[in-house]
Each structure stands twice: as C-alpha cells, then as structure tokens.
Amino acid sequence: MSQSLDQLRHQCDDAGPCSLAEPAPLFRPASLVPASGWLAVETTAVTIGIIVAVRVLHGHGAAAFQWLLIPCALVAAALTPTWIARRDFPLVGLCADHVSLALRTVLPLCLGILPVVYLSLWLLASSGLPIPLRPVPAGPQDWPAWLLYQFLYVAAAEEVFFRGYVQANAMRLLREYRLSEPAQRWIAIGVSAGCFALAHVAVQGQIVSALTFLPGLLMAWLFTRTHSLLAPILFHGLANVSYGIMAATLA
C-alpha cells in the first residue's frame, strides 16, 4: 500500500531535507543564507561601493601604494560581507584535481584565443590605429615584479571579487526563479562579465574599457566550468601578461 502524503512528510522531517540527486554544486550550501532581497541589496551596494573606492584610489593620491591598496580592497569587499553573513566562499582550487582541471581547461583556451588577439592587434597597428587598452610597459629590470603583480594582485584579487563574490551571489539569487540550470548559469556569467566591464570603464574613464566584457565572459565561464577560482585566475594572469607583451612588441 502506498504511503500517505503526511507519512512521507514526517519521514522527510525526521531524516532531514529531501532532495533529488544533483550535480556537485559550485559552492557548498551555506549554513545561513540571507533572504534573496537582502542578498541582492548587499551585492549591489558592495559592488558599487568597491568600484567607487577603487576609482578614488586609482585617481587620487596614494599612488605609491595603489599596487597593494586596490587588490586588498577588492579581496576585503568580497570576503567581509560573506563572512558576516556566514556564507561559504567558492574554492580557490589548489588541490591536485583542481590544478589539473584548470591547466587542462586554460591552456587550450589560451592557445585558441591569444593568437587571434595578436592578429587583431597586428592588423590595428598595421593600419595605423591605436592599440586599445594599452598597458603600462615594464622596464627591463621590472619584468619579474610586473609578472608577479599581474598574477598575484591583479588577476587573483579581481577574480576573487567578480567571480567569487558577484557571480556566486548572482547564482544564489537566480535559484529563486524557475529557470533551467543552463539559463541560471549563463545569466550569472553575463552579470559577472558586465560588472567586470563596468568597473573597468568607471575606473579607467574610457569607454573602450568595455571591451573587457569579452574576457570577462571567458573567465566567468571558466569559473562555472571548473568550480573553482584557480582557472579564471590563471587565464586572467596569462591574458594580461600576453596582451602586455603583444602591445609592447607591436609598439
């Protein structure tokens, strides 16, 4: 004889939450997650606040300490509200399995994307057009420090905030709506890349910085593909360094 609905409900209450088998989540369920409305307000306020703060640090004073203050501000903006709300933060992914997956995903992507970027920049330079988003070149003695800065400070800090905080929170919010999992994933990717590009436009003060939306899409996809921050950090650092070398070479 089939069990009644009340009996099934009591069994679920006794045994804990009942759920169907699902793929491994991007981040573990938090023990205490705020209401979706508060999470949306928090994420919006923190994102606007950090963009304004970085803009101020980038444009006024403290020039000698920009390299440290801006990355620290991004990391603090991502981790502080997460810690206060007792949410779990996405994994960095330094274990062997994540490192292997990150390398197997990032290296083929770089081999496919970077030659196309170089060809595009070469065509611009050959046509006498300026190279967009020209990075500040490093001096002959500064290359090791510049490489370390691109990976450890720029790439790591920006990925911790835009993927680890913004994109992860967007995915939490989208779970409240009756959308398919691919739709939730791609909307969160678009939100993350959009915030990434908006921040670059606001901080650098030039509309051409909106082009960062394209690599933002790739890094957001890498985050969902590998379920850790390591892959987008590696790609971000490699892309920045490669672009800087390309621009310096073509200049």
Image (cartoon, rainbow, N blue to C red):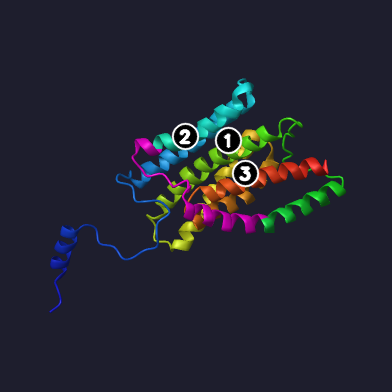
Identity of the amino acid at label 1?
Answer: Tyr
Sequence order check: which comes first, mark 3 or mark 2?
A: 2
Can residue 49 be seen here? The reply is yes
Q: Position of residue 199 (x, y in %)?
A: 58, 39
Report whether 83 appears left or right of 218. Answer: left
The N terminus: image quadrant: bottom left
Q: Is residue 99 magenta?
A: yes
Name the residue beneath numbered marker 3: 237
Report whether 247 appears left or right of 219. Answer: right
Name the residue beneath numbered marker 2: 77
Q: Who's the residue at 68% across and 35% down the image?
A: 144
Q: Who's the residue at 51% across and 34% down the image?
A: 74
- Element type where label 2 sits in the image: helix
- Element type where label 1 sits in the image: helix
84 above or below 232?
Answer: above
| Number of other residues with Cα within 10 Å of mark 2, as a class: few under 14, some 14 to 19, many 20 or more | some
Instruction: Decide whether the magenta segment is chiefly helix, strand or loop.
Output: helix
Report whether 94 appears left or right of 6. Answer: right
- Element type where label 3 sits in the image: helix
Name the residue beneath numbered marker 1: 153
Frontmost of labels 3 and 2 is 3
82 above or below 191?
Answer: above
First to last magenta residue range: 82-110
Q: CA distance from mark 3 to mark 2?
A: 21 Å
Q: Who's the residue at 35% across and 35% down the image?
A: 84
